[in-house]
Image (cartoon, rainbow, N blue to C red):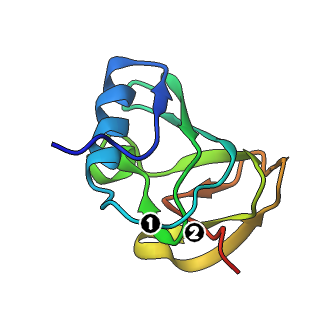
Amino acid sequence: MRIPPWPVRASSPTAAVSALALLLAIPGSASANADGNFYYRYKDANGAEHSVTVTSPPDGRCYEVPEVGNGTTTAAYTPDNATDVEIKVYDKAHCRGNKFIVGENKSLPGRKFVAFYVNVSP
């Protein structure tokens, strides 16, 4: 079994399981990682707010928000980028649809999204 390439902290057991599913879906690679944390929030079916922290997300792949994929929520919101690179968030699965750039050390309060892309390499 491979060790996940980046740690995730979540505010609830459901978020932790979802974050683990996202980690296990990421193939190993020799590419770089963003330095820092990427945060987002979501509300579960009962309306409770949860926050997720993605630490040093790896470069060069579209990441689906696991809580959307498992039916816990319809979208994540308020992406907060505390990394050293831009992160793109998308309102459609597979990094499609409208794209919004979250600059280094920036946040997009209230912005909903279902996928994100990290691009460390030029």
The 10 Å Cα crowd at callout 1, few under 14, some 14 to 19, many 20 or more, is: few
Q: Farthest residue in the left direction?
A: 1
Task: Name the residue beneath numbered marker 1.
Answer: 30
Q: Position of residue 57 (x, y in %)?
A: 55, 51
Kindly report the distance in space between the C-alpha atoms of the residues bearing marks 1 and 2: 25 Å
Q: Are marks 1 and 2 in contact (CB under 8 Å)?
A: no
Please name whichever residue, 82 or 46, is drawn nearer the observer in this view of the structure: 82
Q: Position of residue 77 (x, y in %)?
A: 61, 46
Q: Secondary structure at mark 2?
A: strand
Q: Is residue 50 left or right of residue 70?
A: right
The 10 Å Cα crowd at callout 2, few under 14, some 14 to 19, many 20 or more, is: many
Using the image, determine if residue 119 lies above or below residue 111.
below
Using the image, determine if residue 102 lies above or below residue 94.
above
Label disc, if present, on residue 85 of the rendered structure: none
Say what amino acid the circle numbered 1 marks. Answer: Ala
Mark toward the start of the polypeptide (1 vs 2):
1
Q: Is residue 76 left or right of residue 46?
A: right
Q: Position of residue 103 (x, y in %)?
A: 82, 60
At 37% from the left edge and 38% from the top edge, which residue is drawn? 19
Task: Name the residue beneath numbered marker 2.
Answer: 90
